[in-house]
């Protein structure tokens, strides 16, 4: 009987010692990753009350003009041309600094002929091929004639 009490006492002591030696697991939260941040920059927008961003791919190429094309994982596309990458405000119409947007339903939207809005280039680093800015343009559905507003911003590294 004495051995049984001693064994029970040792078991209880071991149990409490094992509990006191356990360290509570620290929470290691998963760091926030912006899915809109791609290796060569960021292109994000708001169209007709919905926000979007190029979270699949962005291509930016400076040849005669800067051509930017972004694609979302859900299939939306935004493409625009920018005649100059020097800081300043530039007008948008169907001939200069034009935009094309395809929404998630596959509906196309284009820059209307006149006074569609503007693009503001806020900075340009020609040494590192980086440009950033904002835009606010009206886009028209060529089938219905409906006009919608597209606003957004970009921070891109381009090839030339």
Image (cartoon, helix red, strand yellow):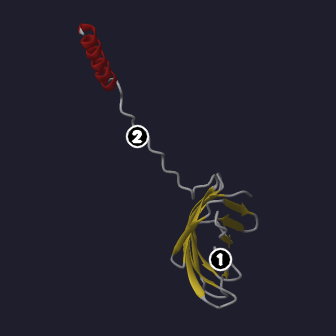
Q: Residue at x 40, y 40 (%)?
A: 27
Per the image, the residue denoted by label 1 is 105
In the displayed structure, 89 sits above or below 124; it is below
Instruction: Say which quarter of the image contains residue 61.
Output: bottom right
What kind of element bears circle 2?
A: loop
Q: Residue furthest bottom?
A: 145
Residue nearest the observer in this picture, 133 or 90 = 133
Residue 119 lies, in percent from the top left, at 58, 73
Quadrant including the C terminus: bottom right
Residue drawn at the location 56% of the way across and 56% of the way down = 35
Q: Position of residue 22 (x, y in %)?
A: 35, 27
Nearest the camera: 17 or 1? 1
Residue 116, how many percent across, how many down? Answer: 60, 84
Question: Mark 2 vs mark 1: which is more N-terminal?
Answer: 2
Please report the residue visible at 69 percent of the width from the left and 89 percent of the height from the top: 143
From the viewer's perspective, tell me whether residue 55 is left or right of residue 10.
right
Per the model, the C-alpha gap separating discs 2 and 1 is: 41 Å
Q: Residue at x 66, y 55 (%)?
A: 129
Counting from the top left corner in percent of width and height, residue 40 is at 64, 54
Residue 120, located in which quarter of the rendered image? bottom right
On residue 156, the disc is: none
- Which label was assigned to residue 27? 2
Q: Quadrant of residue 24?
A: top left
Residue 139, placed above or below residue 42: below
Q: Nearer the viewer, residue 75 or 115?
A: 75
What secondary structure is marked by label 1?
Answer: loop
**In the depicted structure, whether residue 17 falls above or below residue 139:** above
């Amino acid at each position: 009987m004495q051995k049984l009490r001693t064994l029970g006492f040792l078991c209880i002591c071991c149990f409490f010692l094992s509990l006191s030696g356990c360290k509570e697991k620290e929470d290691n939260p998963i760091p926030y990753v912006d899915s809109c941040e791609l290796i060569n920059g960021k292109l994000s927008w708001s169209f007709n009350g919905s926000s979007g961003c190029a979270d699949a791919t962005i291509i930016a190429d400076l040849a005669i003009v800067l051509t930017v094309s972004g694609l979302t994982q859900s299939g939306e596309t935004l493409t625009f041309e920018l005649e100059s990458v020097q800081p300043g405000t530039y007008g948008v119409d169907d001939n200069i600094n034009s935009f094309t947007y395809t929404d998630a339903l596959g509906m196309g939207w284009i820059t209307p002929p006149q006074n569609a809005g503007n693009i503001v280039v806020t900075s340009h680093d020609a040494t590192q091929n980086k440009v950033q800015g904002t835009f606010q343009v009206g886009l028209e559905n060529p089938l219905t004639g409906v006009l919608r507003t597209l606003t957004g911003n970009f921070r891109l590294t381009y090839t030339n």
